[in-house]
Amino acid sequence: MTGEVTRVALPARTVDSRLIVVARARQASDYDAVLDVLVDAGIRSVELTLTTPGTFAHFPHLLERFGDVVDLGIGTVTDGEQLARAVDAGATYLVTPIASREFVAQASDAGVPIVPGGLTPTELFASWSAGASAVKVFPAGQVGPSYLKDLRGPFPDIVAVPSGGVDLAGAEAWLAAGAVAVSVGGPLLGDAFSGGDLGALRDRAAAFVEVCARGNA
């Protein structure tokens, strides 16, 4: 007999946009100018990574400034204390690079969506069967969109978000393969966090927004 799994749904804005931008900056104060451009270009979901120094301290400011128009998640969560702090900070969703039933239970108990990472069928199904909101196929660039089609054979209901090496063409292909959203970092952000042209960033972001919106037309 199988018990019913409690699953917290992904935020509607993230699902509707089908695009999560992973922001990995040198320092948390660098987020503001880049998020201004991303939001203006139509981005509606941003994962702020804990590998960026000062993310927790700066998060309340970002939530106040951008929270009405964009889902702000906290990612690269690697222990239970970080997860608890992210929940307390008001993260819209949580992302972790690992498969952890404990993390899923902790986030679910707090009522916050969580997307754990994994690559093998065993890792991905373990998180999904524990009640993850979605699973992060990582590093997605090592397998390609056909991998999700193969996973859907034994796991037809699994909700997946590919991450790692997803470029513009890859975003379209992964969404066509059935991904609920794509998680994109470098191919969209480029050199934006190291003094790059913010106008070029806006153009790249708008291109991703357009590609990811096609399936919702």
Image: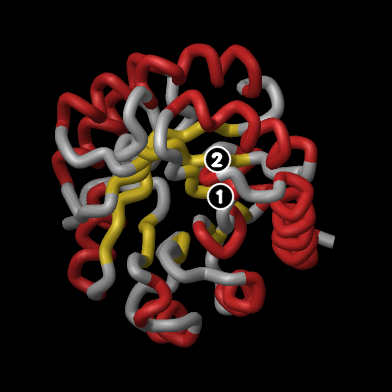
Residue 104 is situated, as x and y percent measured from the top left of the image, at: 25, 41
The answer to whether residue 193 is left or right of residue 89 is: right
Is residue 113 among the parts visible in the rendering?
no
Residue that badge 2 annotates: 46
Q: As shown in the figure, which amino acid type bears the numbered disc 1?
A: Ile
Circle 1: element type: strand
Q: Residue at x 56, y 37 (%)?
A: 11
From this view, report whether residue 36 is shown above or below residue 196: above
Q: Quadrant of residue 126?
A: bottom left
Q: In which quarter of the image is the N terminus?
A: bottom left
Q: In which quarter of the image is residue 208?
A: bottom right
Residue that badge 1 annotates: 20
Q: Which residue is drawn at 16% across and 25% down?
A: 81
Badges 2 and 1: C-beta atoms under 8 Å apart?
yes
From this view, report whether residue 173 is shown above or below residue 161: below
The answer to whether residue 41 is left or right of residue 174 is: right
Q: As shown in the figure, which amino acid type bears the numbered disc 2?
A: Val
Q: Residue furthest front?
A: 195
81 or 27: nearer the viewer: 27
114 or 67: nearer the viewer: 67
Circle 2: element type: strand
Residue 58 is situated, as x and y percent measured from the top left of the image, at: 44, 18
First along the sequence among labels 2 and 1:
1
Q: Which residue is drawn at 23% across and 49% down?
A: 130
22 or 29: nearer the viewer: 29
Mark 2 is surrounded, within 10 Å at the Cα level, by few (under 14), some (14 to 19) or many (20 or more) other residues, namely many
Q: In which quarter of the image is the C terminus?
A: bottom right
The answer to whether residue 65 is left or right of residue 122 is: right
